[in-house]
């Protein structure tokens, strides 16, 4: 032992207790000598009051918490709620329409303008043929409802375009590894990763597990990572699969439906039981004996005489119907918060808003939309464009026109989305004019806000100016005249003025 102690430097250790000074806040104050400060957190304290509230808290990893069974239940519940709740359906549809709109538009930024026009025109034709905007909206809805969406890059010989690339959408249920440990080594339920965390391959079932003709055991295909697009939001480090974005709002949707049904049931009960015969006399008292639960029909506008000791009373709907609208407002506001969506957009009702509050709420929502569009560009569109260009440069007609891989190597591009309409176009136009005059913005930036390419718009303005000059007209003369709403009242006013 002495030999080992000399080699490893083993020394006898002693435990020294340092004096502690409890602070007024219940923790330990720092002392000289480097004593560690220990604090007390209310959220870390488990007592009789909050024990049930924190009962489901766990320390599972992101992939263990989002196990296949948990994700399956969440997907099924979210799909059921969206299919049966008009508010949930409207929120998901609005989110997809605002994020994708009519679809993204490509602008190439190579040094040759002719090459840019050829690529942009060919890509637009291909996007229309494969329904790219429709598929992007479906993927955005699936991300909110299912938590994730998959798109396989395949070859579709039925396309009418020279480029046969296509996107085949796949639900998250179909991407899984059946009858294998769901989390084993570098594999996480249908996705195999390398040692650096990059996806290598995806396991896609040949048939959807929910199909009527699905057979057991199910067979699956191994899809290479470069042929699969996985669109989801990772909320935790290391998370490999997505969960529904409306997950935290699902219990609130259920409460909203239950409360609505309760209000309706109370109103129906009050309407069905219009009158009640009751007595204040004690049991076996002086009131005349009546058959319990007996019914009496009353005619309209007729007076009646009650048996001795009995009174006629009308039941009222005690359900607080006056607070129903307030309850719906608060619960919808809480539901939409998990999607960064303001209440007036989620409810489709801006009656309680003024101009300033509406603009303020929309700023947060539009910022979330821009973040989501940037995510779609990086995860989906850039990969689609890269695969499309790799196939387009092999077409003989494109090669003859100069579309070669060397010409497009490292070429920059950008995507344009639909702009958002302003609440007050006149105020926005004045603000835009002021920004341009003060040189705090550019034409490219202002056109980009409206989802337009400034170069194409400026060319169009030049064509229109040349055509006006050729016709000998001014802009004011060629401008469309505003439509006049000739109502009967307007006709009377005009005739009175003429007289």
Image (cartoon, rainbow, N blue to C red):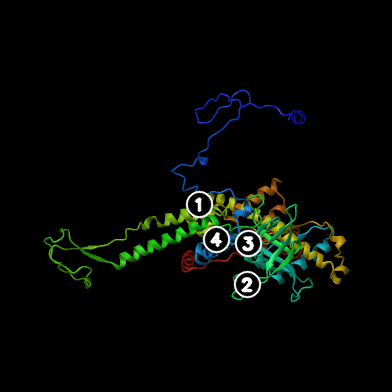
Which residue bears the numbered disc 4?
A: 91
Q: Disc 3 or 2, which lies upstream in sequence?
A: 3
Q: Nearer the viewer, mark 2 or mark 1?
A: 2
- Judging depth in this view, the residue of 267 and 3 nearest the camera is 3
Callout 2 crowding tier (Cα within 10 Å): few <14, some 14–19, many ≥20: few
Q: Disc 1 or 4, which lies upstream in sequence?
A: 4
Q: Disc 3 or 4, which lies upstream in sequence?
A: 4
Which residue bears the numbered disc 3?
A: 140
Residue 226: x and y in percent read 76, 62
Callout 4 crowding tier (Cα within 10 Å): few <14, some 14–19, many ≥20: many
Q: Secondary structure at mark 1?
A: loop
Q: Nearer the viewer, mark 1 or mark 3?
A: 3
398 horizontally vs 425: left or right: right
Residue 465 is at least partly visible in this image: no
Q: Is residue 338 above or below residue 471?
A: above
Q: Nearer the viewer, mark 1 or mark 4?
A: 4
Q: Check residue 354 in the rendering and tell me which mark sits there, or answer none.
A: 1
Callout 1 crowding tier (Cα within 10 Å): few <14, some 14–19, many ≥20: few
Residue 46 is at least partly visible in this image: yes
The residue depicted at 28 percent of the width and 67 percent of the height is 273
Number of numbered tags placed on the structure image: 4
Q: Check residue 341 in the rendering and tell me which mark sits there, or answer none.
A: none
Q: Secondary structure at mark 3?
A: helix
The residue depicted at 38 percent of the width and 61 percent of the height is 263
Q: Secondary structure at mark 4?
A: helix
Considering every residue shown, the one lying at the far front of the view is: 1
Q: Nearer the viewer, mark 2 or mark 4?
A: 2
- Label 2 and label 4: CA atoms lie apart by 37 Å
């Amino acid at each position: 032992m002495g030999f080992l102690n000399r080699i490893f430097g083993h020394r006898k250790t002693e435990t020294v207790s340092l004096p502690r000074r409890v602070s007024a806040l219940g923790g330990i104050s720092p002392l000289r000598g480097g004593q560690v400060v220990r604090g007390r957190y209310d959220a870390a304290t488990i007592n009789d009051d909050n024990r049930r509230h924190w009962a489901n808290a766990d320390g599972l990893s992101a992939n263990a918490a989002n196990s296949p069974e948990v994700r399956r239940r969440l997907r099924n519940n979210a799909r059921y709620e969206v299919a049966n709740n008009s508010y949930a359906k409207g929120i998901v549809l609005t989110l997809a329409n605002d994020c994708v709109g009519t679809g993204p538009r490509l602008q190439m930024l190579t040094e040759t303008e002719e090459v840019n026009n050829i690529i942009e025109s060919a890509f637009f034709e291909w996007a229309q043929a494969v329904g790219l905007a429709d598929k992007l909206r479906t993927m955005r809805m699936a991300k909110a409802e299912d938590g994730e969406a998959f798109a396989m890059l395949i070859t579709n010989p039925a396309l009418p375009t020279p480029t046969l690339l296509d996107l085949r959408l796949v639900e998250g249920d179909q991407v899984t590894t059946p009858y294998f440990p769901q989390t084993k080594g570098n594999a996480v339920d249908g996705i195999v990763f390398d040692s650096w965390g990059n996806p290598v391959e995806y396991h896609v079932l040949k048939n959807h597990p929910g199909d009527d003709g699905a057979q057991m055991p199910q067979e699956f295909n191994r899809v290479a990572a470069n042929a699969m697009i996985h669109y989801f939001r990772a909320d935790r480090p290391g998370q490999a699969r997505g969960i529904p974005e409306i997950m935290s709002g699902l219990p609130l949707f259920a409460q909203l439906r239950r409360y609505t049904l309760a209000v309706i049931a109370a109103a129906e009960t009050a309407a069905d039981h219009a009158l009640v015969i009751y007595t204040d006399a004690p049991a076996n008292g002086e009131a005349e004996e009546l058959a319990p639960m007996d019914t009496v029909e009353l005619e309209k506008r007729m007076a009646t005489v009650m048996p001795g000791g009995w009174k006629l009373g009308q039941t009222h709907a005690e359900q607080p119907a006056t607070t129903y609208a307030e309850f719906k407002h608060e619960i919808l506001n809480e539901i939409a918060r998990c999607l960064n969506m303001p209440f007036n957009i989620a409810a489709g009702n801006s009656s309680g808003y003024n101009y300033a509050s509406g603009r303020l709420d929309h700023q947060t929502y539009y910022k979330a939309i821009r973040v989501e569009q940037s995510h779609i560009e990086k995860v989906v569109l850039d990969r689609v464009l890269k695969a499309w260009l790799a196939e387009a440069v092999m077409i003989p007609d494109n090669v003859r026109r100069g579309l070669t891989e060397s010409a497009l190597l490292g070429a920059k591009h950008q995507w344009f989305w639909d702009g958002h309409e302003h609440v007050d176009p006149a105020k926005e136009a004045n603000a835009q004019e002021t920004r341009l005059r003060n040189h705090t913005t550019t034409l490219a930036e202002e056109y980009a806000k409206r989802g337009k390419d400034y170069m194409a718009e400026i060319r169009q303005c030049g064509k229109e100016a040349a055509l006006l000059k050729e016709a000998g007209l001014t802009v004011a003369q060629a401008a469309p005249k505003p439509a006049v709403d000739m109502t009967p009242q307007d006709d009377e006013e005009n005739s009175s003025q003429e007289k």
